[in-house]
Amino acid sequence: MDFSLSEEQLMIQQAAKDFAQNELLPGIVERDDAQKFPWELVEKMAGLGFMGMMVDEKYGGSGLDTLSYVLAMEELSKVDASASVMVSVNNSLVCWGLDAFGTEAQKEKYLTRLASGEVIGAFCLSEPEAGSDATSQKTTAIDKGDHYILNGTKNWITNGSSAEIYLVIAQTDTEKGHRGINALIVEKGMDGFEIGPKENKLGIRGSDTHSLIFNDVKIPKENRIGEDGFGFKFAMKTLSGGRIGIAAQALGIAAGAYELSKKYAKERKAFGTEIANHQAIAFKLADMHTKIQAARYLVYQAACDKDAGKDYSLSGAMAKLYASEVAMETAVEAVQIHGGNGFVKEYHVERLMRDAKITQIYEGTSEIQKMVISRSILKD
Ligand code: CAA
Ligand code: FAD
């Protein structure tokens, strides 16, 4: 395994780091309190090419590899996981899904606007009764010849109100089970499409999470992605790559919490010396550093598997499982190292701790990653 980075990859990493420090850090506490993320910041991320990183330039993207994408995700997530989840959903779920499986007409009409960041997208699989158990779709897309009629509710949708384009998974033929599911492109403003209230969340509070309600929404057939019945496979294949993005987000949260803790431990004095000189604190930092580096290798490996055209569903699930556990553990320890200040918003680690938790839940909980991993390693 050789993870030495190219000039271009180092440049992207630096650009994301600078953007996070200069543009995302100012105002982050206020945005977290207000549960807001100004569109102006999305425009700036689009300007840097972060909204369609792996999409070909022909369709408005940056034409970069997955490793560049995870490097950017890590740097953005060190500071602002609300920004990075927007980037992750748009890149690895919406753009990648359309790029890999969309028709030429769908790419021209939708992908170009999404990859350039002119608009952003949402990926809509989860429902009130279909989260981990994703094949239990209750949303229906009834085939009416040249169009589908969409009815149902999606829950917890990231970019729920800020998106313009939604990839919606729905059941067309219940008798066929998961082989009767379709993925449809839905536009904001279509008749019968309503956006529910914003969720008031523990973490990633700048990210807008909404339920979506579909009442007899007419979707032209040309908006179906792939063949009839491909929708569940589409969701699974797309999520395999999405999990690499969330693994990189978790890695970034952990690394951000660690960097703040190391700095603090070398400044804060107790019992006549910097707290870093107390072995209990130094060992916490040693554990953090070791686990973060192990998580980083798993994330890079999954990204490199994808770039090399290898199967990455196992390596992506392992990266997400481990990096999210490391994020949670590191962020909790970061608060401990900061003592009372760790409990105060201005020191940032309490936010990273709240943000870390979601990485163990979305794009498949840790238990679901263990299901994916165990099925993969036991199948032979
Ligand atoms: N690639 C391609 N196909 C796949 C696949 C993959 N990675 N995983 C499963 N499939 C296929 C299977 O081959 C099977 O098809 P066939 O019967 O034709 O062979 C079909 O999908 C059904 O698979 P299973 O029988 O394994 O289905 P299951 O009911 O046991 O569930 C599961 C599998 C992995 C648990 C799946 O339901 C799952 O991933 N659940 C978690 C859902 C999830 O991650 N949601 C995230 C929502 S998006 C999000 O969260 C975004 C965000 O926050 C930012
Ligand atoms: P459940 O499936 O009800 O699980 C509850 C608990 O039971 C979990 O601990 C789970 O691991 C465990 N469990 C369930 N089944 C098993 C099993 N077979 N074995 C062992 N344990 C099991 N979804 C989207 O489609 N698009 C989005 O953009 C999106 N964004 C989100 C953003 C946020 C902030 C949140 C909170 C969620 C988001 N989700 C999104 C939904 C997310 O993917 C689901 O919450 C997640 O997949 C878990 O589903 P659930 O909440 O229904 O939990």
Image: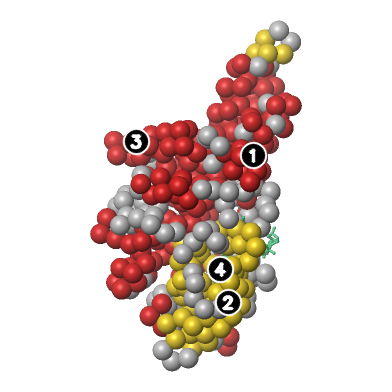
Q: Quadrant of ligand 2?
A: bottom right
Earlier-in-chain disc, 4 versus 3: 3
Identified at 46% across, 71% down, the residue is 187
| Residue 307 visible in the picture | no
Earlier-in-chain disc, 2 versus 1: 2
Give the spatial CA distance, label 1 vs label 4: 27 Å
Give the x, y percent position of residue 245. 48, 51
> Marks 2 and 3: which is nearer the front?
2
Question: Would you call the spot at circle 2 few (<14 residues within 10 Å), some (14-19), or many (20 or more)?
Answer: many
At mark 3, the secondary structure is helix
The residue tagged 2 is: 214
The residue tagged 1 is: 351
The residue tagged 3 is: 10
Question: Would you call the spot at circle 1 few (<14 residues within 10 Å), some (14-19), or many (20 or more)?
Answer: many
Earlier-in-chain disc, 2 versus 3: 3
Identified at 59% across, 80% down, the residue is 215
Give the x, y percent position of residue 82. 55, 47
**Which quadrant of the view contains residue 292?**
top right
Nearer to the camera, 3 or 258? 258
Give the spatial CA distance, label 4 vs label 3: 34 Å
> Marks 3 and 1: which is nearer the front?
1
> Marks 2 and 4: which is nearer the front?
2
At mark 1, the secondary structure is helix
Apparent side of residue 147 relative to residue 195 in the rendered image (left or right): left
Give the x, y percent position of residue 321. 58, 50
**Which quadrant of the view contains residue 213?**
bottom right
Looking at the rendered structure, the kind of residue marked 2 is: Phe
For residue 125, the mark is: 4
At mark 4, the secondary structure is loop
Marks 4 and 3 in Cβ contact (< 8 Å):
no
